[in-house]
Each structure stands twice: as structure tokens, then as C-alpha cells.
Amino acid sequence: MLPPKTTAEQEQNTKKIDDFQRGIGKRWGEIWLEKEEIFTTIKMLYELSEIRKKYPNYKELEISSWADIRRDIEDRMKKTLCD
């Protein structure tokens, strides 16, 4: 890429760089929020598993299997990191 020759070209390049950096910052913020949500979900799953250990005879509502929940979390993490 040739260096800008005019002030207008310099301003245009600066605007493109600024827009690009803002876009990266926005996407990073979205990824960070999704990552925090994933960690909150994982923490909740650990707490639920501790309750199961503490009260093994407790009858609970029918929920997805732990494998299904884990698979959903993994799929969401892959989607978050790959998008």
C-alpha cells in the first residue's frame, strides 16, 4: 500500500483505522460478556452438582442430562470464540 499523498487521504486512512479499532473493541466487549455468562453457568452447574451430592435422595424436576448441558455450553463457547 502506498503512503497517503494528500491530507484527505491521510484523514480517510485515519478514519478507517479508527473504525476498525472501534469494531474490534465492540466485538471484544461482546465476547467478554458471553464468556462471563458461560462462567456463571458453569459455576451454577457446580453448585447444583454439590446439592445432588449433599441430598442424593432428593427428587428434582426433569431437566436435561448433564452431558446435554455440558455439550450446550461447549457449543456456545465454540460459537463465541469462532465468530
Image: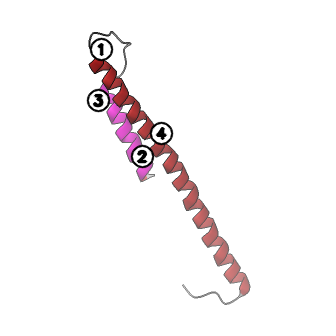
In this rendered view, identify the residue nearer to me: 33 or 27: 33
- Decide: few, some or many residues near mark 1? Use Cα within 10 Å; few <14, some 14-19, many ≥20: few
Q: Which quarter of the rendering shows the N terminus? A: bottom right
Report the Cα–Cα distance between label 1 and label 3: 21 Å
Q: At which x and y percent is residue 58?
A: 32, 10
Q: Is residue 27 above or below residue 58?
A: below
Which mark identifies residue 67? 3
Precedes in sequence: disc 4 or disc 3? 4
Q: Are marks 1 and 3 in contact (CB under 8 Å)?
A: no
- Which numbered mark, 1 or 3, is in the foreground of this view? 1
Q: Is residue 19 above or below residue 58?
A: below
Report the Cα–Cα distance between label 4 and label 3: 19 Å
In what element is the residue under mark 2? helix
In what element is the residue under mark 3? helix
Q: Which residue is mark 4?
A: 37
Q: Is residue 67 magenta?
A: yes
Which mark identifies residue 19? none
Residue 71 position by quadrant: top left
Precedes in sequence: disc 1 or disc 4? 4
Q: Give the residue type that dot 2 points to.
A: Lys
Q: Which residue is mark 2?
A: 79
In what element is the residue under mark 4? helix
Residue at coordinates 36% horizontally, 14% vertically from top-left?
62
Q: Are marks 2 and 1 in contact (CB under 8 Å)?
A: no
**From which residue to which does the magenta span run?**
65-81
Q: Which residue is mark 1?
A: 55
Q: At which x and y percent is residue 36?
A: 47, 43
